[in-house]
Image (cartoon, rainbow, N blue to C red):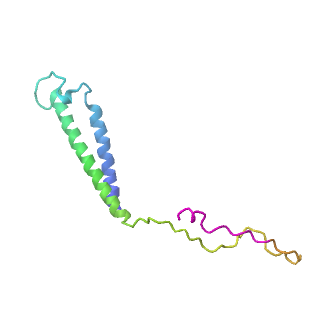
Amino acid sequence: MSLFLFLTVVQAIVAAALVGVILMQRSEGGGLGIGGGGSPGGLMSARGAADFLTRATKWLAIAFVVLSIALAAVAVETTGTQTIESTLDRSTPAAQPDPLAAPAAGAGEGEAAPAAAPAEPADPLAGAAE
């Protein structure tokens, strides 16, 4: 469980960094090579900063996808592999007395107890399946 929690925290940090790096980029299409200008200088130039942000976006996106796959694998391992029941259990347990109902016999009054309610059919959908 601690591995799942650790990976979840790392995933949140990577997601926040990815959002930040994407928001810092210019929106003029420079990443596709459409925009232009600037000298092809080092990291401190506008072109170098754009290249750095593009590379950072790529690696953060790769880390995000890898962490997502790892989290899915860890989640499957922690939840267990129980079999899926494909049938419904339609059996009903024996009827239990209602604890909130009035007492069945009058306490010394001599009145007859009310007749029991008719039993409900065990499975109203049983005839539809045939």
Residue at 34%, 52% (x, y): give it. Answer: 8
Quadrant for the N terminus in the image = bottom left
Residue drawn at 25 percent across, 31 percent down: 25
Q: Residue at x 41, y 65 (%)?
A: 84
Judge whether residue 44 can be spotted in this image.
Answer: no
Q: Nearer the viewer, residue 1 or 29?
A: 29
Classified by dominant secondary structure, the portion drawn in magenta counts as loop
> Where does the magenta region start and end?
115-130
What is the residue that sits farthest to the top in this orientation? 37
Q: Nearer the viewer, residue 69 or 1?
A: 69
Task: Tell me: residue 112, above or below residue 58.
Answer: below
Residue 69 relative to residue 82: left or right = left
Residue 33 visible: yes
Hey, which quadrant is residue 44 in on the image? Answer: top left
Where, by quadrant of the figure, is residue 80 drawn? bottom left
Q: Is 60 drawn above or below residue 93 in the view shown? A: above
Asked whether, in this view, residue 78 is left or right of residue 103, the answer is left
Going by the image, does 36 lie left or right of 122? left
Tell me if residue 54 comes above or below residue 2 in the rendering: above
Spot occupied by residue 118 in the image (x, y as percentages of width and height): 72, 69
Is residue 122 one of those drawn in magenta?
yes
x and y percent of residue 127 in the render? 57, 64
